[in-house]
Image (spheres, rainbow, N blue to C red):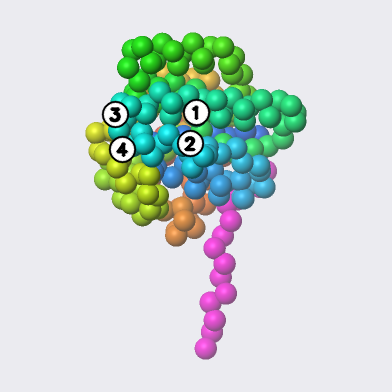
Amino acid sequence: MAIDTDEPREPDTSGITLPRFIAVEGNIGVGKTTLAKKLAATFNYDTLLEQPETNPFLERFYRDPKSAALPTQLHFLLERSQQIQALRQDDLFKPVRVADFLIEKDQLFAEVTLDADELSLYQQVYRHLTLQAPKPDLVVYLQAPLNVLQERIRTRGIAAERAIGNEYLATLNEAYTNFFHYYDEAPLLIINSEEIDIVDRPEDYCQLVEYMLTVTSGRHYYNPGV
C-alpha cells in the first residue's frame, strides 16, 4: 500500500525582501498571537508578545469593568513601556521580530473602558512615559464577527475571558475599525479571518503569508472566500 508522505508546503518567500518588523493586531480572540507566533517560526524571527496573564487586574475587569478598568489599563501601559525600554537597552530594534500588538492600541482600549476623569489621568501617565516604539514595516489587522470571536474565546478556554460579553467585543470591533480607518503609519493589511484556519489548514496559512508579503505600501484587504 502506498503511503502518503506529502508534507504541508511552506510559504514561498523566495526572492522576497521580508519585512523586518511585523505587528499583528485585532480584537480579543481573533487569533493575533497565534498568527504572530507562526510568522515568527516561519521567518525565524523573535517575538514581542502581550502578557495578559501577568495582569492581576484583568480577570476582575472582565467581571466588573467599571471598578477595575483604570488599574487594568495602567498595568498594560507600564508593562509595554518596560518592554520598549528593554528593547532600547539591548539595542534590539535592528533585529527582525513579530509583535502581537501596536503600542498605539493602548489608547484605543483606554478610550473604550475609562470614564473621563480616568482617561485624563491615563493620558497624563502615557505622555510622561514618552513611548517611542519602532514603526512596523507591516501591520496586519485581523477582523472577525462577534460569533467567531466568541467561539474562539470559548475554544481557547481561558477562565478570565468567560465573562467577556458581546457588547464589549462589539464596542472594541467598532473602535478598531475607526482606529485603522485613519491609520497610515505603516503598510496595512486588513484580513477577514472568519473563513481562515491557519492552525488546522496549512494551505490557508501559506496563501495568507504569500499575499501578505506582496504588501509593501498603502492599505490592502485579504478576504478569502468572498
Judging from the image, what secondary structure is the residue with disc 2 in?
A: loop
Residue 215, percent from left and from top: 53, 33
Mark 1 neighbour class, 10 Å CA radius: few under 14, some 14 to 19, many 20 or more: some
Which of marks 3 and 1 precedes in the sequence?
A: 1
Judging from the image, what secondary structure is the residue with disc 1 in?
A: helix
Residue 206: which disc? Answer: none
Whether residues under marks 2 and 1 lie with C-beta atoms below 8 angstroms apart, the answer is: yes
Identified at 75% across, 31% down, the residue is 90
Label 4 sits on what residue type? Arg
Which of marks 1 and 2 precedes in the sequence?
A: 2
Label 2 sits on what residue type? Asn
* Bounds of the magenta segment: 1-17
How much space separates mark 2 and mark 1, taking CA atoms? 7 Å
Res 165 quadrant in image:
top left
Residue beneath disc 2:
55
Residue beneath disc 3:
171
